[in-house]
Every structure is written in structure tokens, then in C-alpha cells.
Image: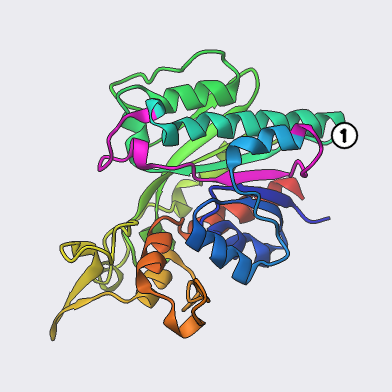
Amino acid sequence: MSITYGSVCSGIEAATMAWHPLGMRATWFAEIEPFPSAVLVHHYPNTPNLGDMTKLGAQVLAGKIEAPDVLVGGTPCQAFSVAGMRQGLLDSRGALTIKYVELADATDYVRASHRKPPCVIVWENVPGVLSDKRNAFGCFLGALAGEGCELQPSGKRWPDAGCVYGPKRTIAWRVLDAQYFGLAQRRRRVFVVGSARDGFDPTEVLFEREGVRRDSPPGRDAKSALHPTLTAKGGGALDDREAYVLEPEGVRRTSVIEWERCQGFPDDYTLIPWRGKPIGECPDGPRYKSIGNSMPVKIIEWIGIRIGHRLL
């Protein structure tokens, strides 16, 4: 029996790129942006894109969509980004994080009614969420854990790794960097794994023995080839340093294919028919944006393998 998953804020589906080869099956996506949605239709025409994630909890409870084994997604990070407005949960995009918790609760409720174990939650965000001035991460942890109130860090900010054992779920989180997973990009992101499933310990997914940790610096050759963190802005504005690379011959703009490789996608993954134009005329702008908004495929693959070992 294959592991099923539902994906929210799906973007161009790093999760499916990582998990489909592992035998995991997507039951549905949820993406509202036009270009990423077109990428999903192009590559995964048989998987429904349900659009607005705020409506999914009610659909799961009504039995209109499947309550999957795994719920994965990176709710919009702009509200928590150092480069953003830092409004946290007051920002409508940050409030989607709470909707994610509601969807997880609805999924577990339905699965319990069908005598299935609770789902496993995989969530991703920028490290800025750990220092959000309104303690958005503590609110998220408290809601997931079932504490009924926000949790507080022991210091001024949440550490880069930790775990919480709550009355509802056990939750672990860790900041992982794409450069330590074989990708030529410095990209630090917070990954959260949680579940109420008996015998499932999220710390065993995200944490490793000392000898095999994924936070050792890459070799000198690999380090010299690292690209700065890709963002949704890259490739758009002429003063975006991330859109350029310095070589012996001079400065040049990094190509879309190079961005796809930095995130672990196949070459031309985002080269699709767009707005009535053939594949060859797909503009670069939305491709850069959708890649910058995605997750590193290799990290999601690593997490998926470790989840699979504990569910199957």
C-alpha cells in the first residue's frame, strides 16, 4: 500500500518531484497562483488542484476529498520573512498557517472515524518565523500540539532545532540548508514534522546521529559554486544580485535552468505552454518566481524517505 499525501500551497510541487519516485501518491494539490497551477496541470493532469486551501478542512470533513496519510506544505512565508513586513499572524498570508492547523485537525478527525492512524504533518517556512516579534511560531506550535495557548521560547527567539511533546501531537523542527543536500544553493529553511500517530517520533525523522548530520560545510569546490538563496523576485528586477553570477569572463544573468537545478528540478521543468503560447515562448519571469517560491527537492526527498521508513 502506498503512502498518500495532500499538498497545500503546492507551487510547482517539489513534494511530488521528490516523493513520486518513492512510491508516494498525491491525492490532491491546493494552489491558487496561475503560473504554478499551469505547471501542475502540465505535469500532473490526473491530480486535482483544489485551489483555495482555506476551504479544504470543510471538504475533508464532508468527505468530498480524501484525508491523506501525510499533509505537506509551506504556507506563505512573506509575513515571516526578514525582507517582508513582519506582521506575522496579523498578515492574511501568515493566518494561512492557522488554516493549515485546522486542515490537519480535520484530517485526523476523519481518519480516526475510519479507524486510520493520524496523519503526518510536514511544514516549511523561512527562518524568520523563529524570531517573529508576535511569536507566530509559538502560536503555530501551540495549536499543533493542542496546548490551547501559544508556546514561548526559552530565550528571545526560537532555536534552530527542537521538539515539543503536546497533548495532541509530538512536533519536531529543524533548520536545514539546501547546500548540505547536494544542491548548489545556500537556502536555510525551517522544516517541521509532527503527528499524533502512536509509535511515530518526528525527532527520528529530522534528527540524525552525530556522524551523519546534514549540517557540515561542503567541500571547497562545492562551496565556491554556491548560489545565493533564490527568491520570488530573482530574475525580475535589474538590481537583483541573486539573478547574476560572476565568472572569469565577466558578469552574466543566471539562467532559469540553473535556478531549476539549484532547487533540484529537472531542466526546463517550468518550461510549459502559457497563456496560449507554445512551450518555446514561455516567459522567464513567472518561471523565476515559481522556482524561487518552491522548496528544495532534495530536502523534501530526504524527509520523505525517513517518513516512509516509519510508516511502511
For the point 39% across and 77% down, which residue is it?
A: 257
Closest to the observer, 223 or 33: 33
Classify residue 88 by image quadrant: top left
Taking the image as shown, residue 287 lies to the left or right of residue 200, namely left
Q: How many marks?
A: 1
Classify residue 160 by image quadrant: top left
The colour scheme applied to this rendered structure is rainbow
Closest to the observer, 72 or 21: 72
Residue 159 appearing in the image: no
Q: Magenta stretch: give its range.
A: 61-88
Q: Which residue in the rendered view is the most extreme toward the right?
A: 114
Q: Residues within 10 Å of mark 1 (few under 14, many from 20)?
A: few
Q: Which residue in the rendered view is the most extreme toward the front?
A: 276
Closest to the observer, 27 or 116: 27
Asked if residue 129 is positioned above or below residue 184 in the image, the reply reads: above
Report x, y in % for residue 13. Answer: 56, 59
Report x, y in % for residue 68. Answer: 74, 44
Asked if residue 119 is positioned above or below residue 228 in the image, the reply reads: above
For the point 79% across and 33% down, which residue is it?
A: 62
For the point 84% across and 55% down, which residue is it?
A: 1
Badge 1 marks a residue whose secondary structure is: loop
Report x, y in % for residue 217. Answer: 31, 58
Report the amino acid beneath label 1: His
Task: Provide the residue designation for mark 1.
Answer: 114
Report x, y in % for residue 45. Answer: 68, 67
